[in-house]
Image: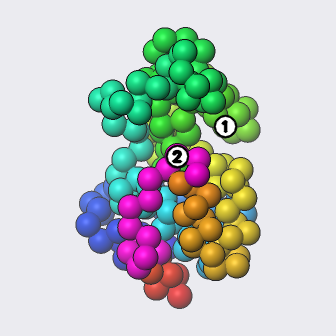
């Protein structure tokens, strides 16, 4: 894929560092048609602001203060101790967020993510975890049916912010892969 065509404002060196890990992750998780690839790359680019952000910025914001117990949000995330919100903040191109998600992702990818959550900031693992998350949400089916709004709805329902659907990354990804 021509990542520069999808993200024309992202530094070339950054895109080059992600190309092989993205391709490998897409192969492993069967993101293997033009429709799937375009949607996956577009949403990864959107959520990570052009493949740049792989770690959730921490204020903490009002919402982030809910990531620690005793809040209901902390319970949803599986965060059991004070500081888990910060420790298990979102990481990856489609961020893994919360102790439970880190545990599941780590188990699937055979990585010690509970002990070393920052591993998901590495390009290889940022891409693999994004592809794992994509598959765990069943998004290939929506891509196969050309349903970008269904993908957006599914991603926003689990807490991701979609910034530029409606022509931006998705249109450029489709054109780059045509």
The reply to whether residue 96 is visible in this rendering is yes
Residue at 48 percent of width and 37 percent of height: 90
Q: Badge 2 local density, few (<14 within 10 Å), some, or many (20+)?
A: few
* Nearer to the camera, 52 or 20: 52
Q: Indicate whether 3 appears above or below 100.
A: below
Disc 1 to disc 2, how far (Cα)? 17 Å
The reply to whether residue 176 is visible in this rendering is no
Q: Badge 1 local density, few (<14 within 10 Å), some, or many (20+)?
A: many
Residue at 70 percent of width and 76 percent of height: 144
Estimate the x, y position of residue 72 in percent, counting from the top left.
58, 25
- Can you tell which quarter of the image residue 121 is in? top left
What's the magenta region?
A: 157-170
Q: Indicate whether 128 appears above or below 143.
A: above
Estimate the x, y position of residue 105 in percent, counting from the top left.
66, 37
Estimate the x, y position of residue 67 in percent, counting from the top left.
49, 26
Q: Indicate whether 101 appears above or below 165.
A: above
Q: Residue furthest top?
A: 81
Estimate the x, y position of residue 57 in percent, counting from the top left.
34, 36
Q: Earlier in the sequence, mark 1 or mark 2?
A: 1
Residue of label 1: 105
Residue at 52 percent of width and 46 percent of height: 159
Instruction: Tell me the tag on residue 159.
Output: 2
Tag 1 secondary structure = helix
- Can you tell which quarter of the image residue 12 is in? bottom left
Tag 2 secondary structure = loop
The verdict on residue 50 being magenta is: no
Instruction: Tell me the tag on residue 21.
Output: none
Residue at 66 percent of width and 49 percent of height: 132
Q: Indicate whether 14 appears above or below 36.
A: above
Q: Nearer the viewer, mark 1 or mark 2?
A: 2
């Amino acid at each position: 894929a021509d990542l520069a065509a999808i993200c024309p404002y992202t530094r070339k060196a950054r895109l080059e560092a992600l190309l092989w890990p993205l391709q490998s992750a897409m192969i492993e998780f069967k993101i293997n048609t033009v429709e799937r690839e375009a949607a996956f790359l577009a949403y990864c680019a959107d959520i990570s602001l052009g493949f740049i952000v792989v770690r959730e910025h921490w204020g903490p914001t009002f919402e982030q203060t809910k990531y620690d117990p005793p809040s209901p949000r902390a319970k949803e995330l599986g965060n059991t101790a004070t500081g888990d919100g910060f420790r298990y903040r979102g990481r990856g191109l489609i961020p893994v967020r919360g102790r439970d998600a880190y545990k599941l992702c780590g188990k699937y990818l055979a990585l010690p993510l509970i002990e070393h959550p920052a591993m998901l900031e590495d390009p290889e693992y940022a891409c693999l975890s994004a592809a794992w998350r994509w598959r765990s949400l069943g998004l290939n089916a929506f891509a196969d049916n050309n349903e970008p709004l269904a993908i957006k709805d599914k991603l926003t329902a689990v807490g991701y912010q979609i910034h530029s659907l409606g022509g931006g990354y998705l249109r450029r990804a489709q054109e780059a892969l045509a």
